[in-house]
Amino acid sequence: MQPHALTPTTPEGAPFERRDFIVSTYKHLGAAMVAFVLLSALLMVSGFSGTTAKMLVASGNKFLWLGVMGAFMLVGWLASHLADNAESPQTQLMGLGLYVLAEGLIFAPMFGIALLVAPGAIGAAAFITLLLVGALTWTAFTTKTDFSFLGGILKVGGLVALGTIIAGAIFGFKLGIWFSGIMVLFAGACVLYDTSRIIRDYPADRPAGAALHLFASIALMLWYVLRILISLASSDD
């Protein structure tokens, strides 16, 4: 056996710096996911999730969600900029932490709605999401396929999805379960793309930034899996 043989976590031909970066990225991702779970649990136990859910539902303002999403996108852009471009590891971590906080707040009303409509949907959505992400991660690491070609497709798809969401809010048509299904597929493609970049070419001194992008893709998948389960529970009533 060679003394420096590559481990299963190291892609063939990659330097050990890349292996260490991959390990560090998934440590950051794990910490971000734990922080998100704890924050979400705190917001649900405190009643914040239920209160915001009732406020959003009672208001009937179709532009309110757009305002929330707009603020979230702004915070997301700022967090991504910090995590991707800052030289200081502390600043990169600040960007990741800011993004986790923003995700926790944007998910709060969705979790509140789930608690009212289908309490078991949150755990089921989390399990399904982790299962899908695990399968996609295994695929990216074992097939050695470069999924970077998805980058341009995802940019166009993201703009189309955003335009559809805005149009739905303005003109009042509902985005049905089919749209949520498409967005789950879109999020899965994002996971493949992000994982492929982590394996191959994401800057090795930016583990927090890599973790942020992957966390964002996982959160997107969780959002729409949960929407599907809530829709199914509502249609059964």
Image (spheres, rainbow, N blue to C red):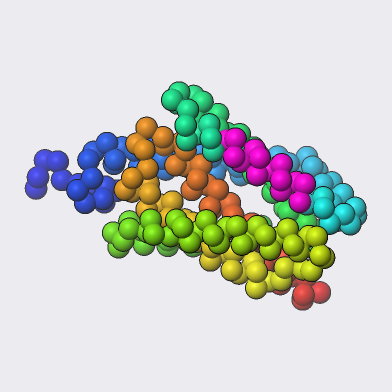
Total number of numbered discs in the rendering: 0
The image quarter containing residue 221 is: bottom right
Where is residue 3? Give x, y as percent.
11, 40
Is 223 left, or right, of 127 in this rendering? right
Is residue 70 rendered magenta in the image? yes
Quick check: 162 above or below 231?
above
Position of residue 193 measured from the top left corner of the image (x, y, whole percent) = 43, 55
Observer-nearest residue: 231 or 44?
A: 231
- Identify the residue at image location x=90%, y=53%: 59
Residue for point 43% across, 60% down: 150
Q: Is residue 46 left or right of residue 214?
A: right
Residue 154 x/y as whole percent = 50, 58
Find the magenta span and give its range: 66-79
User: Magenta stretch containing residue 139, yes or no?
Assistant: no
Residue 4 vs residue 217, the one in the foreground: 217
Q: Quadrant of residue 127?
A: bottom right
Does the rendering let one see residue 19?
A: yes
**Nearer-the-camera pick, 134 or 18:** 18
- Up-down: is 235 above or below 136? below
In terms of depth relative to the viewer, which is nearer, 134 or 11? 11
Residue at (71, 48) in percent of width and height: 69
Q: Is residue 72 left or right of residue 26?
A: right
Q: Position of residue 213 (x, y in %)?
A: 50, 45
Residue in view at x 31 percent, y 61 percent: 145
On screen, residue 41 above or below 165: above
Furthest toward the left, the residue is 1
